[in-house]
């Protein structure tokens, strides 16, 4: 029996040692070092005077990345640094729960992407390498007693609204595209399908407050209704015999992983054409 107990203790001893080495150990300066069975993998340094906690992750003695958490008057600021000390990202959460997220350029000197997150609203701005705005996207989620609805607006480098999209609970996406002068260039109506959003109608304005509605399947026009200013239909044309051509770029479907909030050419085009 004694031999059996001795054997069990000898077998358990390495596990106990590893467990003890994995426990955070505090040094005289108040820093907590976390070890695995071989080496230190993390160092946590609290600074109560500045309301700050610095966490450094290490591998074979080299710092992989460093995270600093700063607390002040109920707000929290988290900054993450790359091994060379270059700042990578920053998240500031205020007392009201709103967060501002900054993603920095490779050298850490400029902001590449800025995101503001608050209840019911997300605003994201992407910057060029020279610091000028590339595009801004605003996402507004409306929820309450009625059905939920999400609105996505895209603004160009001059801050002008260029694309307005509304996603409703039924799976429809209604899009209004504006030209550089702020006038409506065309409207689209999409429905949610198995392979993504499916375009079903394009409406293009005509002189005299008239318009034409193109009903489509895939990238082909089935028919065209010419609409008067009062909303009544004046004439209907078959899709293969239209009086004026259609811009093929307006007849596009989106794959499930695509973001239809960003116009073509702003980011790599991952859209699929039918």
Image (cartoon, helix red, strand yellow):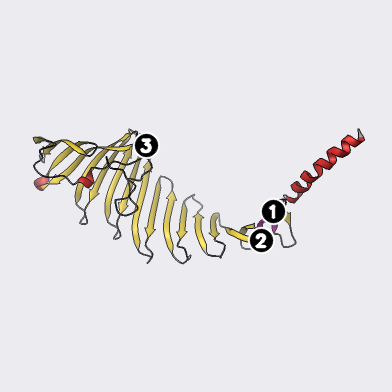
Magenta highlight range: 28-48
Compare residues 135 and 138 and report the one nearer the observer: 135
The Cα atoms of the two marked residues, 3 and 2, are separated by 51 Å
Look at the image and say whether residue 44 sits in the magenta stretch: yes
Q: Nearer the viewer, mark 3 or mark 2?
A: 2
Mark number displayed over residue 61: 2
Figure quadrant of residue 51: bottom right
The residue tagged 1 is: 34
Q: Position of residue 93 (x, y in %)?
A: 50, 53
Q: Is residue 222 above or below residue 23?
A: above
Tell me the distance, in whole angstroms, between the alpha carbons under discs 1 and 2. Answer: 13 Å
Identify the mark nearer the N-term, 3 or 1. 1
Residue depth check, mark 3 versus mark 1: number of the one nearer the observer? 1
Is 10 situated above or below 59? Answer: above
Crowd band around label 2 with a 10 angstrom C-alpha radius: few (<14), some (14–19), many (20+): few
Q: Position of residue 205 (x, y in %)?
A: 15, 45
Q: Is residue 204 visible?
A: yes
Residue at (39%, 53%) from the top-left corner? 124
42 lies left or right of 264: right
């Amino acid at each position: 029996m004694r031999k059996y107990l001795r054997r069990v203790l000898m077998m358990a001893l390495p596990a106990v040692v590893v467990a003890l080495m994995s426990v955070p150990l505090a040094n005289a300066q108040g820093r907590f070092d976390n070890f695995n069975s071989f080496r230190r993998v993390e160092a946590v340094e609290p600074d109560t005077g500045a309301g700050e906690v610095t966490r450094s992750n290490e591998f074979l003695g080299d710092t992989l990345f460093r995270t600093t958490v700063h607390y002040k008057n109920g707000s929290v600021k988290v900054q993450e640094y790359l091994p060379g000390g270059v700042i990578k990202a920053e998240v500031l959460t205020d007392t009201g729960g709103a967060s501002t997220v900054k993603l920095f350029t490779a050298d850490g000197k400029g902001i590449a992407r800025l995101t503001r997150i608050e209840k019911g609203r997300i605003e994201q701005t992407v910057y060029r390498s020279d610091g000028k705005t590339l595009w801004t996207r605003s996402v507004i989620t409306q929820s309450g007693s009625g059905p939920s609805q999400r609105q996505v607006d895209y603004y160009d480098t001059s801050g002008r609204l260029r694309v307005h999209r509304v996603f409703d609970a039924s799976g429809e996406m209604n899009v209004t595209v504006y030209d550089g002068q702020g006038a409506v260039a065309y409207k689209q109506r999409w429905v949610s399908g198995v392979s993504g959003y499916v375009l079903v109608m394009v409406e293009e304005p005509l002189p005299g407050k008239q318009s034409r509605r193109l009903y489509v399947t895939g990238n082909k026009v089935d028919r065209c209704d010419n609409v008067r200013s009062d909303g009544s239909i004046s004439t209907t044309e078959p899709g293969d015999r239209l009086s004026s051509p259609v811009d093929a770029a307006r007849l596009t479907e989106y794959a499930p992983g695509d973001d239809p909030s960003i116009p073509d050419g702003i980011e790599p085009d991952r859209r699929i054409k039918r």
